């Protein structure tokens, strides 16, 4: 299907972008376009104006923060994030999750901000951000605000962004340094397909104390962090692997669709959680 007609404008600052949105009912922002353009071709979105963000200099960088964290501009392609030295050294689980998104040519365009704004329950990058206690900076007609990633997703395809709000930056805090783990993912084929089930498990040891993360993709209305599993693991460690996996399995609420049945997805959450947790030992 051909793209519907629309006006395309480019801007050079977040303020200019917000003004361009305010001047046209039905406008939408565009960075990489890997989610938006297929939706337009399928007829699911038909914006009157598309506002290109790639000329906004402040959205295009990755910068180190004083606390050891990293701030990622909203227009930075995933391919740059996955090889960036600070990300690989400090937040490797984000790089691992990014590498599961599509194929390299797609990641040359796709952005981390665009992936979470699409708000798919199967978003591979969202579960890394949940595990790392990320925050999202947004600006809009009502001003600027910071949204904890745990409060960002409102449902399938829905975020808490208000009309006209533009994500400008995603921050990984220094307080999340040190988590190591793996992202185990099932899909109908490798690459270029959404996850049928995804399970991220990670652990950090500081001063002899372990802290864990267990986050699920594609098995609930939003990406899901299972804090109950984490608490069990923090308390009992390796001896609680089976219990933590069972809690994660019971916490999810999958649907049946073309990629798999609800029953299959639920059982595989338990299987993948056990595998991931065993690999941490």
Image: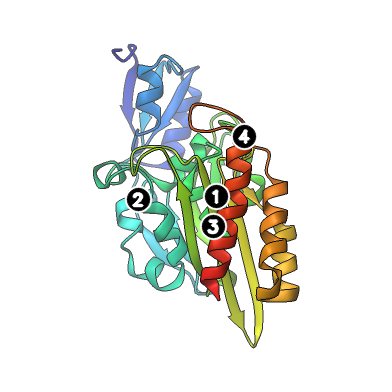
Please give left or right for residue 19 compared with residue 78 in the image.
right
Question: What residue does disc 1 label?
Answer: 137
Q: Position of residue 177 (x, y in %)?
A: 53, 73
- Residue 200 x %, y %: 54, 57
Given this view, does label 1 or label 2 mark the residue nearer the observer?
2
| Circle 3 residue | 200
For marks 2 and 3, the one nearer the N-term is: 2
| Measured Cα–Cα span from mark 3 to mark 1 | 24 Å
Local SS, label 1: strand
- The span from disc 1 to disc 2 (Cα, nearest Å) is 18 Å
Q: Mark 1 and mark 4 in contact (Cβ < 8 Å)?
A: no
- Residue positioned 33% across, 64% down in the render: 84
Location of residue 43 by image quarter: top left
Of all residues, the one furthest to the left in this rendering is 105
Q: Could you say whether the residue bearing mark 2 is in a helix, strand or loop?
A: helix
Distance of mark 4 from mark 1, alpha carbons? 34 Å
Cα separation between marks 4 and 3: 19 Å
Q: Quadrant of the N terminus?
A: top left
Distance of mark 2 from mark 3, alpha carbons?
19 Å
Q: Which numbered disc flags the more N-terminal residue, 3 or 1?
A: 1
Please report whichever mark, 4 or 3, sits nearer to the chain's N-terminal start.
3
Which of the labelled discs sits on residue 262, or is there none? 4
Image point 60% across, 80% down: which residue? 205
Q: For mark 2, does the 10 Å Cα neighbourhood hold few (<14), some (14 to 19), or many (20 or more) residues?
A: many
Note whether 90 is above or below 106 in the view shown.
Answer: below
Dot placed on the residue nearer the N-terminal end, 4 or 1:
1
Q: Nearer the viewer, residue 67 or 116?
A: 116
Q: What residue is shown with label 2?
A: 78
Element at badge 4?
helix
In front of the other: label 4 or label 1? 4
């Amino acid at each position: 299907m051909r793209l519907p007609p629309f006006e395309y404008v480019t801007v050079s600052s977040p303020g200019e972008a917000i003004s361009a949105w305010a001047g046209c009912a039905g406008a939408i922002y565009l960075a990489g376009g890997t989610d938006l353009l297929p939706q337009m071709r399928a007829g699911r979105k038909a914006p009157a104006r598309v506002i290109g963000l790639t000329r906004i200099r402040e959205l295009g960088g990755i910068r180190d923060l004083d606390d050891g964290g990293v701030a990622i501009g909203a227009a930075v392609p995933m391919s740059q994030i996955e090889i960036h030295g600070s990300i690989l050294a400090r937040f490797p689980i984000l790089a691992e999750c990014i590498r599961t998104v599509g194929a390299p040519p797609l990641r040359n365009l796709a952005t981390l901000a665009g992936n979470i704004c699409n708000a798919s329950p199967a978003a591979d990058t969202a579960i890394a951000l949940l595990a790392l206690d990320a925050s999202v900076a947004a600006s809009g007609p009502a001003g600027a605000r910071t949204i904890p990633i745990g409060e960002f997703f409102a449902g399938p395809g829905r975020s808490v962004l208000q009309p006209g709000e533009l994500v400008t930056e995603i921050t990984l805090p220094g307080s999340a340094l040190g988590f190591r783990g793996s992202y185990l993912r099932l899909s109908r084929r490798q690459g270029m397909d959404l996850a049928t089930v995804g399970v991220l498990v990670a652990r950090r040891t500081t001063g002899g104390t372990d802290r864990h993360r267990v986050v699920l993709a594609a098995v609930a209305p939003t990406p899901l962090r299972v804090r109950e599993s984490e608490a069990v693991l923090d308390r009992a460690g390796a001896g609680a692997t089976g219990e933590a996996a069972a809690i994660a399995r019971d916490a999810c609420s999958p649907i049946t669709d073309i990629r798999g049945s609800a029953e299959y997805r639920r059982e595989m959450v338990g299987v993948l959680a056990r595998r991931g947790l065993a690999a941490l030992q």
